[in-house]
Image (cartoon, rainbow, N blue to C red):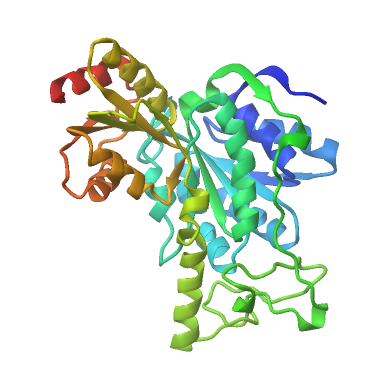
Amino acid sequence: MAKRLEVMSGNEAVARAAIAAGCRFYAGYPITPSSEIAEKMAELLPKVDGKFIQMEDEIASMAAATGASLAGLKSMTATSGPGFSLKQENLGFASMVEAPVVIVDVMRGGPSTGLPTFPAQGDVMQAIWGTHGDHAVVVLTPGTLEEVYLETVRAFNIAEKLRTPVVLLLDEIIGHMTGDVMIPDDSELEIIDRPKPTVPPEEYLPYDDSYGDVPPMGSYFEYPFHTTGLHHDKTGFPTTNPVKCGALIERMLRKVFGNREWLEKNVEHYTEDAEILVFAFGSTGLAAEVAVKWAREQGIKAGLLRPLTLWPFPEKRVYDLAEKAKAVVVAEMNLGMMIREVERAVRGVTPVYGVLKANGQPIEPPEILAKIKEVA
């Protein structure tokens, strides 16, 4: 089957792409503005012999998705801000047992129940640091409908390859935006599956680092093994040995941060000679594209860096572009989250300014353009 152009929303694109990536288990609980993902997964999964279950809450949903992954299925859950908060404890468990699972968070206004039907980008720090302890997670932030489809597939590939949770961050605008999406033929998609054991079940060690930073992963039904949220040794059983505990955490961090080059993915416009660098993501990144184009038409050498991988943060690329710029403008629908990471990456080589908003209204291109002209 050749590529085909279809009309769908961002939330539907997530579900369609998840099926194409091999997702065969979904557990979730309805919450605005992500509910359409669950609705579509409930429709599509039975057609591919997959399993859909609506759990009693978001805590159980994250637990079920993690358990299904340990049992051998590619799994996903989706939610919005308050539900994402509830998922954090079991997201930490998924990190500790190194279970590949994709968590979609369609961001809305907060804190608490906030603005359920309005857009925001206030969950980015929670996505990165929400669960406790030293842990590594990958966060992707698509900005167009086609990117939603492709980045959902990439989220599953990363989760499977690195045995780690991956957070796919959309905002309400991207989730509910409807338009044309070019759906690639399945044969054109790179699909990655988790590394499998090659030893007999009785010899399998679930966290055997002699294979490298990402040990092979057996399923519960083929390779019965012990899992625990406690620090553990290569057998999966708990340990308090400081050498083994330290090595475990360092390895889990290394398998993510040691793959920065493979994980990093950015969209750039006019960055070759940019004197004013704009940093924005998600739907705000689309507004920034327009603002940068308008600035160019007015003779201002503006450029845009729009990360698709928000974490690990593209700090080297940010620094390299900022070093050549007179100023950096960060636009985001919160009152200062990623701007702190940009400031850290820039390391004082040029001033950093914000276009920040947290009132439920999107950041418009004229607002970004005004800041560009102000600092140019």
Residue at image position (51%, 50%) is: 263
Task: Tell me the quadrant of the picture where the C terminus can be found.
Answer: top left
* Rendered view: 202 above or below 171: below
Say which quarter of the image contains residue 120. Answer: top left
Q: As drawn, is 155 to the left or to the right of 120? A: right
Residue 195 in view? yes
State the quadrant of the N terminus.
top right
Q: Which residue lies furthest to the top in this view?
A: 297
Q: How many marks on residues?
A: 0
Q: Which quarter of the picture shows residue 374? A: top left
User: Is 126 or 291 nearer to us in this picture?
Assistant: 291
**Percent coordinates x, y for residue 17 in the rendering:** 68, 35
Give how far across and how far down residue 287 sits, in percent: 37, 20
Q: Residue 284's spot in the image, x, y percent?
A: 38, 26
Return the x and y of residue 60 as percentages of the image width and height: 61, 54
In this rendering, is residue 315 above or below 330?
Answer: below
